[in-house]
Image (cartoon, rainbow, N blue to C red):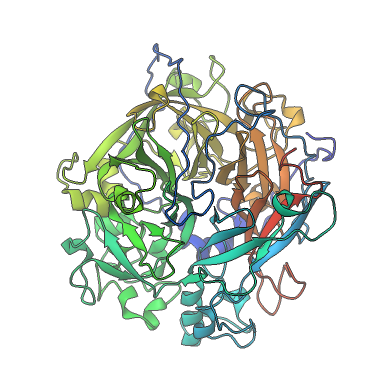
Amino acid sequence: MSESAPRRRLLPLTDLVGGGRSRATCVLRCGDACFHPAPNTSGNAYFGDIFQKVVDRRAALRAGAVTAGASAFGFAALAPAHADRDRGGHGHGRDPRLEFRSVSPNNDDKVTVPHGYDQHVVVRWGDPVLPGAPEFDVRNQTAQAQAQQFGYNCDYVGFLEMGDDKALLWVNHEYTNENIMFPGYTDPATADTEYIRIAMAAHGGSLVELERDSRGRGRGRGGRNSGKWKLAEGRRRFNRRITTSTPMRLSGPAAGHELLRTEADPSGTEVLGMLNNCAGGMTPWGTFLTAEENFHQYFGSAPGTPETDRYGLSTSPSYRRWERVEERFDLSKHPNEANRFGYIVEIDPLDPDSTPVKHTMLGRFKHEGATTRLTDDRRVAVYMGDDERFDYMYKFVSAERYIRGRRRHNTGLLDSGTLYVAKLTGNSPAEEIDGTGALPSDGAFDGSGEWIALCTDTESFVDGFSVAEVLVHTRLAADAVGATKMDRPEDFEASPVTGKVYCALTNNSAREPGQADEPNPRGPNRYGHILEIVESGGDAAATSFDWNVPIVCGDPEDDDTYFAGYDKSKVMPISAPDNLTFDADGNLWISTDGQPGSMGYADALHAVPVEGRYRGELKTFATVPVRAEACGPFITPDNKTVFLGPQHPGDNGTFDAPTSTWPDGDFPRPSVVCIWQRNGQDIGK
């Protein structure tokens, strides 16, 4: 552990439950999913009883990182998060190391950053976004005003450069906590319906224009050396709000199918809004992908069929009672409405009037993210997790190639191709994986895997399922082909240096010791782990891969933790890995969702090298306010700025009795902050 953080035994707080969240967050974010039986009741093996000796270990791995996109608009760096580049010093063929001193574990009601760094709140709940939007008045909120203001909570953060000193920031608004938002709020079944409409308007996403701010303390603050960003002043023509009422288009093979038709939309191609958008990604052609996750909680009175049960849809009225103001959320009256949610949605940041697109070809499940890579022949691969206990990892590979500068062609790439689900096998004897987290005799949790094709846009490979049925009932199709049950696969991210792909497996307290397998080696798995995937030949189009578990999260003092073999006395504790990103040097950054409950201190943003002699040296870069979750994160391509989105601060309080007053000292407001070095150096140095 860092010398700046003295070691102490960290005990869980008794008022937090499930995977480490507060009970309020469990109810409002995912419909109390951890307090219901896991929807996956398939007989798919956990692979704890399977032994497969891998004799063909792949030695020649080619980097497959995403390449830069282009735009006819002439903006700079219209590209995915990080283009493959050689930055020197800590780049290719070197041993990257993070040089900041870890932040100590704490429960402070603020964002805490390392010595030598500074921070700034860029945008907060209620800030005006659209022209003419009123200033925020927390005691006089209206749905009309909220639809023009920055929404509630802030999960995925996307960043698009438009020159040296201009950028666009996209932020998901995952869900709302009405107990904190509204004075005197009590029961959604009887609350003023205007509160429901405000909450509906606070979902979705916001796009805001930013400008670099060279003012402030420290050296190196001017122009490109400044890591501080702020909301742009003057005319902001790209600013946009997406809500639950925004018209969207369903695209891909399932669009128009009878499963997607409703009384309001007999064509099955048009839908209003998006729900519970969690993580996301960016395409090579400069659009944002945003992931609908726990959409099930917004609907009530489901028919209780195998299809609705598999997605956790309630046969009772919904907790949020949105059906009180919009009948479409009552599935007894509109049974297909829920089939129109649970997709990856594409947002064009350069056209404020464009219609967002829900891509059915990427499947329907509780999407956590959508990370893109280019294959060796320049097709587009998209990696996606289904955030539920015992659910699956997916990949899509487009049929056509990405063509730089051909934006119209590229925007159709996600509508045709092949959708896959992952099946993993360990290479250790079953008796060596006993659920305790003890390493097997070969010294690593590792093995091989295959991507099982579910369908193309024209052909289903699952018996009894049409293409449209695979894409609408994707979980059931994946059950049928024997996919591997994982411990809540959330965000994926690919290294810009090696092309290796990483998945955050948040936790799974429901996994019994006898259900442990090599890719999920603990039962129960309270703290989560990180999975590293190496596609065969390094090609994102490969249908086979090797995998290993470089980090088994938890307190380093515990025997069941592992940090890629690094000295555990020199690493920081981590629990509930959620969102991932990389810096340009290839260091993995991990934000958490559940440390307060599992370890007794604030959620955080951690960072760790995944290559070289410092592989596994995990440090804590920032902690977030009381009861907040560390979301985002995003590191700008110039390696100067970290964007972090603390959401649901004070989630166990109420408006009248808050447990957090971050960021302004009065009532909690989910916000996005930027963090940078005061001396102008790169992040992590």
Q: Is residue 123 visible?
A: yes
Q: Quadrant of the N terminus?
A: top right
Q: In the orientation shown, which residue stands out farthest toward the top?
A: 55
Q: Residue at x 72, y 68 (%)?
A: 659
Q: Position of residue 72 (x, y in %)?
A: 42, 54
Which of the two residues, 520 or 458, is positioned nearer the viewer here? 458
Position of 593 compared to 657: left or right? left
Quadrant housing residue 132: bottom right
Q: Position of residue 393 (x, y in %)?
A: 39, 41
Q: Residue at x 46, y 60 (%)?
A: 277
Which of the two residues, 245 or 82, is positioned nearer the viewer here? 82
Quadrant housing residue 616: top right
Q: Work out whether 333 lies above or below 97.
A: below
Position of 187 compared to 422: left or right? right
Which of the two residues, 492 or 599, is positioned nearer the viewer here? 492
Q: Position of residue 605 (x, y in %)?
A: 66, 47
Q: Residue at x 46, y 38 (%)?
A: 66
Q: Quadrant of the C terminus?
A: top right
Q: Work out whether 486 lies above or below 209.
A: above
Total number of numbered labels?
0
Q: Position of residue 674 (x, y in %)?
A: 69, 56
Q: Work out whether 250 lies above or below 428.
A: below
Q: Is residue 481 visible?
A: no
